Image: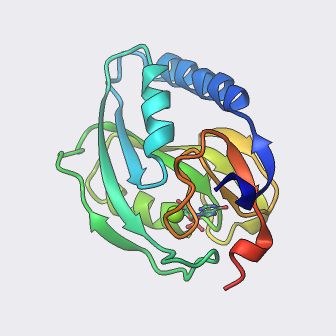
C-alpha cells in the first residue's frame, strides 16, 4: 500500500493540529446552538471522528451516503443519495462534514437537498479544499487545508475504496489511477 504513494502532502501531526483548531472554532461559533453534524460517507468518517472529539459543546451527528464517483478519479457530475439521515433536521443548525471539496457538485447538491428540510442554518466544514477545480458555487465556512490539484488518498479518502486506512494524506502515484 505505502509503495503506491508518491509523496506525503499532510502528516498525521499536521492533520491532528488543524482538526483540533477546527473543533475549537466550531465550539466557539456554535456555543448554545446544539449543532447537528452531517458526515458525508464514506470519506468523512475518519475526519468526523477526530473533529467531534475536538468539539467541547453539546452536539449531535448522523451520516449520509452520497456517491458521485464510482471507481474513477474524475467526477461524473451525477450525485446519488445512497443512505439518508434518520433524524429530522428542521430548525437545527447543520454542519455538513466532508472530506474534500473538489468540483463542489456533491456539496452543492447536498446543501440544496438538506436546505429543503428547513434547518435553521447550514454550513460546510471540509477538511480539504481544491479551489482550482470548482465547478459549482459552494462556499465552505471551515476548511482544514487548501491543497493543489492532485488526487489524494488517506485519512478516509479513497481511490477505488482503497487507502482510507492511511493515517496521513498522500498523493497517489499517477500510474495507479490511469483509467
Ligand atoms: P466534488 O463533488 O467534485 O466536490 O467531489 C467530492 C467528492 O469527490 C469527495 O467527497 C471525495 O469522495 C471525492 N474526491 C474528490 N477529490 C478527491 C481526491 O483527491 N481524492 C479522493 N477523493 C476525492
Ligand atoms: Mg470517494
Left or right: where does residue 164 sit relative to residue 63?
Answer: right
User: Which quadrant of the frame does ligand 1 lie within?
Assistant: bottom right
Residue 36: where, in percent of width, then height? 33, 35
Residue drawn at x 48%, y 40% is 46
Q: Quadrant of the N terminus?
A: bottom right
Residue 172: where, in percent of width, then height? 73, 61
Residue 21: where, in percent of width, then height? 63, 22
Residue drawn at x 53%, y 52% is 164
Viewer-proximal residue, 11 or 106?
Answer: 11
* On screen, residue 121 above or below 74: above
Viewer-proximal residue, 12 or 69?
Answer: 12
Residue 45 sits in which quadrant?
top left
Residue 176: where, in percent of width, then height? 70, 73
Left or right: where does residue 51 sit relative to residue 147?
Answer: left
Residue drawn at x 60%, y 39% is 167
User: How many numbered marks have been drawn onto this rendered protein structure?
Assistant: 0
Residue 132 sits in which quadrant?
bottom right
Q: Quadrant of the C terminus?
A: bottom right
Residue 144 sits in which quadrant?
top right
Residue drawn at x 37%, y 38% is 37
Left or right: where does residue 9 sit relative to residue 22?
Answer: right
* On screen, residue 23 above or below 171: above
| Colour option used | rainbow
Viewer-proximal residue, 107 or 73?
Answer: 73
Amino acid at each position: 500500500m505505502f509503495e503506491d504513494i508518491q509523496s506525503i502532502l499532510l502528516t498525521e501531526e499536521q492533520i491532528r493540529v488543524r482538526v483540533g483548531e477546527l473543533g475549537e472554532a466550531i465550539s466557539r461559533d456554535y456555543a448554545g446552538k446544539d449543532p447537528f453534524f452531517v458526515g458525508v460517507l464514506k470519506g468523512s468518517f475518519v475526519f468526523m471522528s477526530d473533529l467531534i472529539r475536538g468539539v467541547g459543546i453539546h452536539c449531535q451527528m448522523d451520516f449520509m451516503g452520497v456517491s458521485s464517483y464510482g471507481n474513477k478519479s474524475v467526477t461524473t457530475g451525477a450525485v446519488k443519495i445512497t443512505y439518508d439521515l434518520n433524524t429530522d433536521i428542521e430548525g437545527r443548525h447543520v454542519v455538513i462534514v466532508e472530506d474534500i471539496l473538489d468540483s463542489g457538485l456533491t456539496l452543492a447538491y447536498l446543501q440544496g437537498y438538506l436546505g429543503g428540510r428547513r434547518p435553521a442554518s447550514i454550513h460546510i466544514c471540509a477538511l480539504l479544499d481544491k479551489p482550482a477545480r470548482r465547478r459549482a458555487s459552494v462556499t465552505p465556512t471551515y476548511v482544514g487545508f487548501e491543497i493543489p490539484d492532485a488526487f489524494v488518498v488517506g485519512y478516509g479518502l479513497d481511490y477505488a475504496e482503497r487507502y482510507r486506512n492511511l493515517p496521513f494524506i498522500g498523493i497517489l502515484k499517477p500510474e495507479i489511477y490511469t483509467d
